[in-house]
Image (cartoon, rainbow, N blue to C red):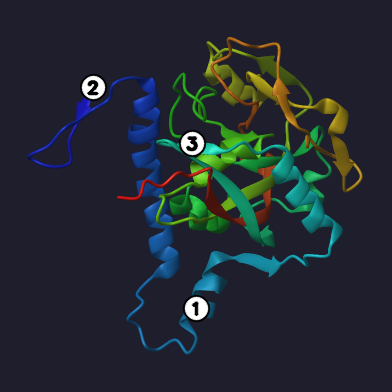
Amino acid sequence: MVYSFSLYKAFTFRDLGDLAEHGAAAFETVRDITAASYVIGDMSDGIVDDPLFDRYKKLGCSISTLDRDSSDYKMIVNYLERTYEPYKVGEINYGVSVENIYEVEPSACPSLEEIKKLPNKMLLWCGSRSSNLLRHLHKGFLPAVCSLPAPGYMFGRAIVCFDAAAEAARYGFTAVDRPDSFLVLAVASLGEQILETSSPPEDTESLEEKKSGVKGLGRKKTDESEHFVWKDDIKVPCGRLIPSEHKDSLLEYNEYAVYDPQQVTIRFLVGVKYEEQDAQYVQE
């Protein structure tokens, strides 16, 4: 499959992974730009006294800095450290360090109190590219644009989260010269019944119609003996990453899919910095 945005150079999709990474991602980026354009508006307009605060109000979202000494801050740092593995770009491994954590209450998402009335709730990492962060805050989570047998898309038009910060960090990484990024933590209700699978579902449309919760079983899982409960009944699957029994799974880490945006709410933004690990430099 080939597509081209110029008269001179075409890009070839080598496999479905490429289609997910470039084709579907490009479509979603256009959707994100549309939302961001509304929020940012015309920056040359000199009528507004405080342009930055004006854009913040248009987000329809309350964002406050989390106290570094608070139990939630320490819990999130622990959750990230235990479920993170270095992200490799070329020959260099990248770790992450937490810069800041923000508590978020977006009006486009259900409130935490509304989510707490639903069954099987979990605090999960979400794969958010930097380009779609504004859209998440302004419009809430939107389902994937297509169904592909590839991580992030194998459950059809679903909202996909992870119990491993390592997977979310792959989405958050932008470029080696732009080390600052954000990871998203959301509270998701997986519904009354949860389908567990280690292979792409054959019929994603029925899952979308039933709004069933799906757990994709990865080759690695978090150690269940270290999981705990937060806010009375919200499960936090925080634990060291260990090999699972699903060695042939398409997924490296567990993925959780929900189909109703009213079952997911953004709770925290985790500001991180990607840092080189064990980098070797050759002096000429």
**Distance between the Cα atoms at labels 2 and 3?**
27 Å
Residue indicated by mark 2: 1
Residue indicated by mark 3: 88
Question: Which numbered disc flags the more N-terminal residue, 2 or 3?
Answer: 2
Could one spot residue 187 in this view of the protein?
Answer: no
**Image height of 114 relative to 178, above or below:** above
**Of residues 274 and 161, which is closer to you in this image?**
274
Q: Residue 199 location, x and y as percent?
A: 57, 12
Question: Which numbered disc flags the more N-terminal residue, 3 or 1?
Answer: 1
Q: Amino acid at mark 2?
A: Met
Q: Secondary structure at mark 3?
A: strand
**Image height of 95 relative to 207, above or below:** below
**Of residues 111 and 181, which is closer to you in this image?**
181
**Distance between the Cα atoms at labels 3 and 1?**
36 Å
Question: Which numbered disc flags the more N-terminal residue, 1 or 2?
Answer: 2
Q: Looking at the image, is mark 2 or mark 3 nearer the viewer?
A: 3
Q: Which mark is residue 52?
A: 1
